Amino acid sequence: MDMPGMTMPAPAAAQPRTPIPVLTDADRAAALPPSMTHPGQDDAIHGKVSIDRLDVWRSAQGTAVDWETQAWFGTDMDRLWLRSEGERRNERTEAADVEVLYGRHIATWWDGVVGIRHDLRPGSSQDFAAIGVIGTAPCKIDVAATVYIGASGQTSARIEAHYDVLLSNRLILQPQVEANLYGRNDPRRGIGSGLATLESGLRLRYEFTRRFAPYVGVVHEQAFAGTADALRAAGEGARDTRWVVGFRFWF
């Protein structure tokens, strides 16, 4: 007989035989997969060497070659970066530089870098201190931005970005842009202050393997302000559009 205000005890079968223990942090960590419980970095030494761009085209001075290459060695947190860009025309080096940088992981997909850059051409050789970032921006845009400070007080900056558009599993279209800026005029090297050059390219490559891919493309280069004036004074144009062929590979 039920009486108002009275609570009947639950049947014995409905009550647990042993109390359920309170969950601890250790219990929660043990329930997660290893990739979530151990997000730490890999201390093993890795490395990669790549020629990202090796353009060949015909110019008024003969066959020309333009290259961009980089390599890194180290762990997920600390790396040694080596980079080089340059151009040769008619078997003569018109521009070339080499960079040695220390890279440190600073955020997801981003490394901060600091080191030195040595310019071999144009003009006499010179050295710069370098500081910048290398990484992948939203929408998977690869970016490298570096500021340089020279011993003579010259400053410059180089910003490069490219993006891979997958037309198929092997056919890839890559838009690319690179801007070079300088803090002051350098008449000996034909450089004006401000935005000196802006290069944009569109290359279509076919990856026979992920490590090797020939390509064809079109590149447009534009000089501005004092740099454009220096080129005109030397009998050259301030803008150039060219068809290129080349290949990229890494190991």
Image (spheres, helix red, strand yellow):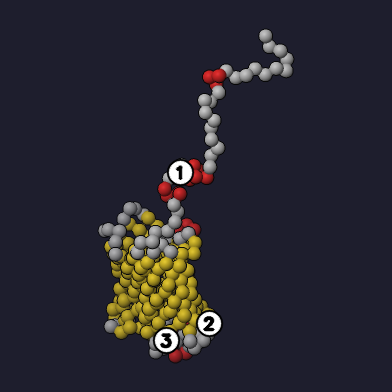
Amino acid type shown at disc 1: Ala
Q: Disc 2 designates what residue?
A: 183
Left or right, 28 with reference to 73: right
Expressed as whole percent of the image width and height from the top left, the position of residue 59 reads 32, 79
Q: Compared with residue 198, is residue 39 higher up or lower down, i.e. above or below?
A: above
2 or 3: mark nearer the eye: 3
Which residue is pictured at 43% across the width and 69% down the height?
A: 103
Give the secondary structure at mark 1.
helix
How packed mark 1 is, by other alpha carbons closer than 10 Å (few <14, some 14-19, many 20 or more), is: few
Of callouts 2 and 1, the N-terminal one = 1
Q: Is residue 177 visible?
A: no
Quadrant location of the N terminus? top right
Q: Nearer the viewer, residue 203 or 29?
A: 29
2 or 1: mark nearer the eye: 1
Amino acid type shown at disc 3: Gln
From this viewpoint, which residue is outermost toward the top? 1
Of callouts 3 and 1, the N-terminal one = 1
How many numbered marks, from 0 up? Answer: 3
